[in-house]
Image (spheres, grey):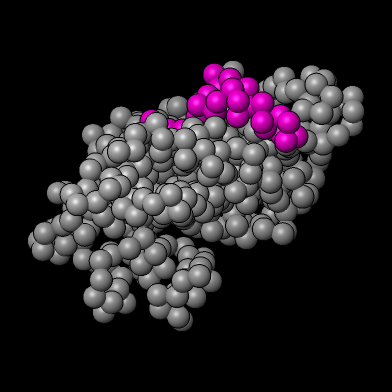
Amino acid sequence: MVTEREIWKILEEVKDPEVPVLSIIDLGILRKVELTPLPGRDEPQVKLFITPTYSGCPAMDVITMDIRLKLIEKGFRTVSIQQQLSPAWTTDWMSEEGKQKLKAYGIAPPNPKQQFCTTEMFQQEAVQCPRCNSYHTELISQFGSTACKSMYRCLDCKEAFDYFKCH
Amino acid sequence: MNPTLFTYTLHLADNALIVGQRNSEWTGHGPVLEQDIAITNISLDYLGQARNFYQYAATVYNNFNENEKKAVDKYIPRAWKEYNRELQEDDLAFLRDEHQFLNLLITELPKGDWSHTVLRQFFFSAFQFYQYQQLQKSSDAQLSAIAEKSIKEVAYHLRWSSEWVIRLGDGTAESKQRMKIALANTEMFTGEMFTPAPYEEINVASLKDDWNKKITDVFSEATLTPLKPDGVGGRPWFQTGGKEGKHTEYMGFLLAEMQYLQRTYPNATW
């Protein structure tokens, strides 16, 4: 009989379609796995709870489909995936490994949430350039190529880069 | 179940969908690339919020008994009744007529120039921020969860729009003049946010002090004349009606564009 831990392991292979270095485990999207034995069958019913990053994130539909396909590929045919909104997803759930992977990919990883998730205006956040490690950077725009990112530029190496903003 | 839960959820969904649809008109037309991306990202957040609310409204309706269904029948799209299937989010968004929408009038106003869009966003985001703060304490677990999720996005909208109000208000003579015109055109639609409708779970009138304080702080930074307090001469006559389905002349055109596809090709998907 398969264990919950093994399901978590399998789902490490499901990546965020917009940030393909991150798995749904790195992102903290997968919240819970429940297994129920099915009479007369070798494999159990798999019930998953996932949480969206942003309300309108178009990647969520793709991720749900990818999870289903991955589990079918591994022989789990009875899968139910439920969306869970509360507690609301936060970048604080991103794994340390995930943050390192993001940086290596050229995206600055999120700072801890309590520092900058406020309505205070014109805040300057210390964001490290993922290329040259300088903190001498400035905000170009709070909104970037996807809902979860903002745009920065490095004033030392002059490179523009994405910052996975705290949420 | 309580029929007003359905109506209230529709109101919250309609606010998000309609202002999101309006902002999406900037796609490809923003003043600079970064701000084009910003305003369309804000639209995307609204679309997500609207979907969460519409999905919930549809679930609530499908679980109603016959009497409860009858109580909210005036909001149910006629076209759907011939489909012989459960109510879905898209039916509520794309098949209802103008008088069945319960969004605030301020959300449907034309996008105007950048100053009109920015000021509407600021007024509405400040309201939505305090509204969702209260909604998080809702006795309804799903409404509370959607509010908890969405308020983080609204905090970004509020910050972004506050900064733009200051940038334009305290900018050039031209940008200040445009902010003044936007204010003259928009202020009369702010009163409706705080006029309670019978289906509203939270007391919106009680949000007004916080909202006023936020507006006063940002306007002072933006060197704009503060709004006139209640009871002082020269305040505009506040327009109302959206919460009961009575809309401005702009609403029909918005729906015609937004709903065209589903009405022409019923149940189309891609």
* Residue at x 25%, y 38% (from the top left corner): B140
Residue A82, magenta (yes or no): no
Of residues B256 and A161, the one drawn nearer to the viewer in this rendering: A161
Tell me: residue B96, above or below residue A113: below
A76 relative to A167 in the view: left or right: left
Tell me: residue B178, above or below residue A136: below
Do we see residue A124 in this rendering? no
A121 relative to A134 in the view: left or right: left
* Residue at x 24%, y 41% (from the top left corner): A36
Name which quarter of the figure residue B122 lies in. top right
Q: What is the x, y in percent for residue A103?
A: 71, 29
B177 relative to B41 in the view: left or right: right
Q: What is the x, y in percent for residue B120?
A: 57, 46
Of residues A37 and A81, the one drawn nearer to the viewer in this rendering: A37
Do we see residue B20 in this rendering? yes
Name which quarter of the figure residue A144 lies in. top right
Residue A93, magenta (yes or no): yes
Numbered disc total:
0
Of residues B188 and A88, the one drawn nearer to the viewer in this rendering: A88
* Residue at x 35%, y 42% (from the top left corner): A48
* Residue at x 48%, y 65% (from the top left corner): B251
Q: What is the x, y in percent for residue B194?
A: 38, 40
Of residues A52 and A63, the one drawn nearer to the viewer in this rendering: A63
Q: What is the x, y in percent for residue A22?
A: 60, 37
Q: Residue furthest right?
A: A157
Q: Residue furthest bottom?
A: B264
Please provide the residue range marked out in magenta: A85-114
